[in-house]
Amino acid sequence: MPWREDGFHGWTKGTSAGPPNMGPVRGLAVPGFLSLVITDSAGRRLRGKTGHDETRAVEFSWLKKKECRYGGRPMKRDQIMGNRHRMRIAGDRVGFTLVEMLTVIVIIGILAALISAATIYARARAREAAIYAQIKQMEAALMEYKNQYGEFPPDFWGLHSNDANIRAQAEQELRRHLRKRWPRYAAGTDPVTQFGADLAALGMDATKFDAATALVFWLGGLPEEPLVPGGTYKPAGFFADEEHPFQLGRPRTGPLFEFDPKRIGYGDSDNNNSVDFIRYYPEGPAAPPVVYFRSKKDPATGRSGYAVNGVIAHFEHTVDDVAVAYLDGGTVSATPAWRNPDTFQIVHPGLDGMFGGPRTINDPTRWPVTITGARFTQGDYDNITNFAARLESEIE
Ligand SMILES: [Ca+2]
Ligand SMILES: [Ca+2]
């Protein structure tokens, strides 16, 4: 900072080469406050006093002279050379320069950006943690379901497959489960047929149910009240009558999980006045729902997993966004190892709102692998499942 004959110029803070015969000047000045440290050329410290008055003047003296005075007159060059010095901030200005203001603004801007980035990151992690916590609760509810009814509920995947073998397998799983949970249901007839008829009477088309609907249906149960267009699906368990569980009578059994009705979407995708899907959206209806895949035994191979007849269990949100069950790593071959091979997988699309894809659902060598991240697509990495709070954390 330049030194002027009548004092400091543009001086606000920092270090300045001092006047002749004097060492560096350090200090800070803001309006109403001034702090200075001045040394002579030998490095000896000069005693200073700050001026808070209108003149913003400061008077210094050598240390050996104990004298300090306030004054308002401009400092003269010959005074600097003498034992007694009076310095004056030029123009009584002790504010910030434009450069300093800009520097501060830039620094504040950088800090604000850092803080907001950190806040956004922290919020995203908190939302993910909240979703993961819900999924773990669903997992616990499914465990409880098995405790009470002997097996995990079917996932409805394959009920409307074009592949007759897959469709037959899905129906067989549903039939077995209905027999197991409600042995007195549909006595003397096919429980799958009766199930379809009972739900049709409630305005639902069970043949269209999917892997997202299974989660809400089995853990939540039937709606509290008859469904009306634009209404709410409030899961209220199943009718406690062992012979007629799929009627809206009272009392009910369950539900095993408290779904927030505001986050349940249901609809009639083929416009035939029957509800085809009931889905749960922990992050709002804009995102794909949570899906549930139950481990199944492939009748052709006898192996447990999530594929039947060479087709992986899946839920098609859109053509290019398809939820699938995940492999567990290792060698991807025609006999893949599955994640949770004997229980189930719950899959949430994560905060990006995508499960991942496009997928090849009938080629095991192209199914996604959790531990290596092999064939993961962009949408897979942040997916939240009952075995990983974030799928990418699974990748070695
Ligand atoms: Ca329909
Ligand atoms: Ca995702």
Image (cartoon, grey):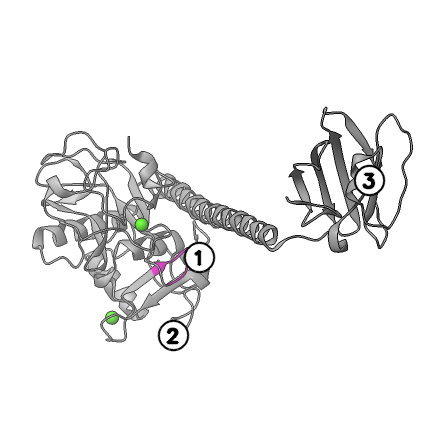
Kind of residue at badge 2 = Val
Residue 252 is tagged as: 1
Residue 242 in view (yes/no): no
Kind of residue at badge 1 = Arg
Q: In the picture, which quadrant includes the C terminus?
A: top left
Above or below, 37 relative to 211: above
The residue that label 3 is drawn on is 79
Residue 344 is tagged as: none
Describe residue 271's horizontal placement relative to residue 390 as left or right.
left
Label 3 packing within 10 angstroms: few (<14), some (14-19), many (20+):
few
The residue that label 2 is drawn on is 228
* Element assignment for label 2: loop
Q: Earlier in the sequence, mark 3 or mark 2?
A: 3
Residue segment shown in magenta = 279-285
Above or below, 286 relative to 339: below
Q: Position of residue 36 (x, y in %)?
A: 76, 38
Q: Which of the 4 image quarters holds residue 387?
A: top left
Q: Is mark 3 within 8 Å of ligand 2?
A: no
Q: In the picture, which quadrant includes the N terminus?
A: top right
* Element assignment for label 1: strand
Q: Position of residue 321 (x, y in %)?
A: 23, 56
The secondary structure that dominates the magenta segment is: loop
Q: Position of residue 22 (x, y in %)?
A: 72, 32
